[in-house]
Image (tube, rainbow, N blue to C red):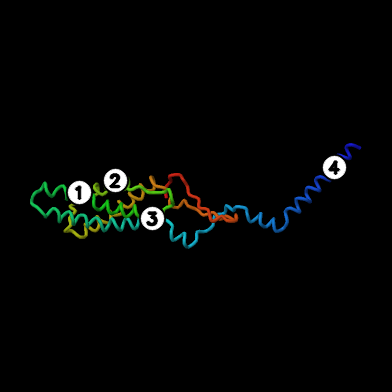
Amino acid sequence: MFRALMVMTIVLTASTASAYGARLLAPDDAASTSSGNVSLTPTPPSASSMMNAPASVWLMRGATAGVGIAAVPLSLWFTSVIGGLSNNLLATAIPSLLVMGLLAPTITALVSWIMANTNMPDGQRVGFWLPWLGSVVIHCALLVVGGFLGLSVGAPVGLAVFSIIDGFAMSFTITGIQQLAGRNVGAVSSLETHSPGESTMNVVTLSQVAF
């Protein structure tokens, strides 16, 4: 008899609780509750977010190579102009060597650095000095090779070929170092939230990976 009363009590309590819960969770309340859940499904980027997205790697490589191709003959021309300003070898040698070795990689690395840091998410930045140093080393090494091959401002065809090789070499060196030392420019993803009063959530990786 006591067991039967306990069973009846449990059944009545369970049915009452379920009925009370069903009354509390009305259809309107259920809809609002489901709308308050956070969806972690990535949403495609909008047009405004795509306009504010960082430059792609291949765009940076192409633009950096183009700048390098134009900067190499410009630096060699400035070198020849400075070398003809005076007959004093010591007075012209140091400025000429500095311009010849530093002008083209500095311009190339500066343009790539600006492009890499344009529209970057907060907390993510690409350094300048390490890619610049790499481009200087590559550029000077190619200048030594070009000197042995008779590179001259007065030889347009050879200068053009050398500028193309040097420009692409500096471009891939700079962007390669930026990939190794920089942060992921494509690591920002938007997560749509359905919670009232909450906007789209941006998720940014904090690890240093290639972009």
Q: How many marks?
A: 4
Give residue 202's position: percent from left, percent from top. Answer: 50, 52
Q: Are marks 1 and 4 in contact (CB under 8 Å)?
A: no
Give residue 3's position: percent from left, percent from top. Answer: 88, 37
Give residue 73's position: percent from left, percent from top. Answer: 22, 57
Residues 35 and 110: in front is 35
Residue at x 81% of width, y 48% of height: 16
Using the image, tell me which numbered label, if any, was put on residue 133: 2
Q: Secondary structure at mark 3?
A: loop
Q: Secondary structure at mark 1?
A: helix
**Within 10 Å of the Cα at label 1, are there few (<14), some (14-19), or many (20+) other Cα atoms?**
few
State how far apart marks 3 and 4 are (Cα).
69 Å
- Single out the mark in the foreground, 3 or 4: 4
Tell me if residue 164 comes above or below residue 14 in the rendering.
below
- Along the horizontal axis of the image, is 205 left or right of 20? left
Residue at x 65% of width, y 55% of height: 34
State how far apart marks 3 and 1 are (Cα).
29 Å
Say whether disc 3 or disc 1 marks the residue closer to the N-terminus. 1
**Within 10 Å of the Cα at label 3, are there few (<14), some (14-19), or many (20+) other Cα atoms?**
some
Query: What residue did someone put label 1 on?
Result: 98
Give residue 136's position: percent from left, percent from top. Answer: 26, 47
Query: What residue did someone put label 4 on?
Result: 9
Say whether disc 3 or disc 4 marks the residue closer to the N-terminus. 4
State how far apart marks 1 and 4 are (Cα).
95 Å
Using the image, tell me which numbered label, if any, was put on residue 118: 3
